[in-house]
Image: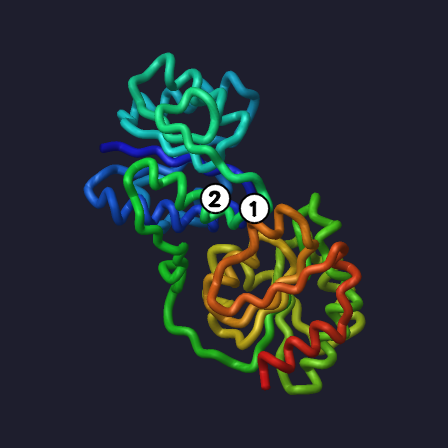
Amino acid sequence: MNILVIKHGSLGDLVLSFGAIKTLRENYPNSNIYLLTQSNYKQIFKNLPYVNEILVDNRISIFPSVKNILKKVKEKKIDLLIDLQNSTRTEIYNLFIKIFTKCKILSARKFSDYKYKQKKLGVQHITKNHQEQLKYLEINTYLKPDLSWMLKGNTKQSKKVIFIPGTSKSGEYKKWPSDKYAEVAKYLVSRNYEIYLTGSDLDINTINEIIKLCPDSKNKINESKIEDFYQLCMSSELILTNDTGPAHIAGLTNKNVIWLANDNEISRSCYPLGNNLHKITASNVKNISVNTIINKIEQILK
């Protein structure tokens, strides 16, 4: 069987889908499994062990996109399409695939052969939706996402705390203030911890603001590319993060992760997974106090 999984969205959304994809590989060990997602993720997750190949859909205007997916479905002789995105766009894909191919479709949207009724955001974690969706294929055992395959060698833990103080361009409302990060950094430095400030070039202003207030903090942008981030997190004792994509990678290290987020439907359904996730939420994340975070750190690092 040839299976195509569709998953667009943010970095965090994609990482959360890896449990479903791993589960598919476990249940279809001899099948060809393809993942359709954005081109920027193809390089980052090129070693994803559960798929034969990552195919690209950059969600350009709809008719070129439809032409692109029809071509891929026919070239790869796809028998089953599993729509983990369940969006208006994939509903349109479903329609044309239904008309022009014999491929079966598992989706919460129209034109599917196996119609899954997806729970609304805020009701349950998104991976629970994935688990329920796969039950339509008589798959009753769901595997959690696992990023251990991203390790590039042995890791040695040291007294370092990783901060993820940035967000995407559209995520300013999810950022805990830089001056509060700096206050926590000062506290940790007083306890002889190294502070690693991670992110991308888009976060440089935020990182510089923290360093200005806590000069002992270290800019580690060059060491925190997504393909290297799991390895970096594995060498830390604690991770403090906003509600942003890399937090989902950090959570799956099973290190202690303090996750700061707005309390809303999205955060209740799409929080990072991991055995040591400490969620601290508020109606406005910017109002979470420094003392709240320091008290949590003292509980963790005692």
Q: SS of the residue at dot 1?
A: loop
Q: Is there any visible trace of residue 247 in the rendered image?
A: yes
Write down the quadrant of residue 69 in the picture. top left
Q: Residue furthest left?
A: 30
Q: Which mark is residue 282?
A: none
Q: SS of the residue at dot 2?
A: helix
Q: Position of residue 68 (x, y in %)?
A: 43, 22
Towards the viewer: 118 or 47: 118
Q: Which mark is residue 41?
A: 2
Circle nearer the N terminus (1, 2):
2
Badge 1 amino acid: Val
Q: CA distance from mark 1 to mark 2?
A: 28 Å
Image quadrant in which the C terminus is located: bottom right
Towards the viewer: 76 or 212: 76
Q: Position of residue 1 (x, y in %)?
A: 22, 33
Q: Position of residue 76 (x, y in %)?
A: 29, 28
Query: Neighbour class for label 1 at 10 Å: few (<14), some, many (≥20)?
Result: few
Residue at 51% across, 55% down: 226
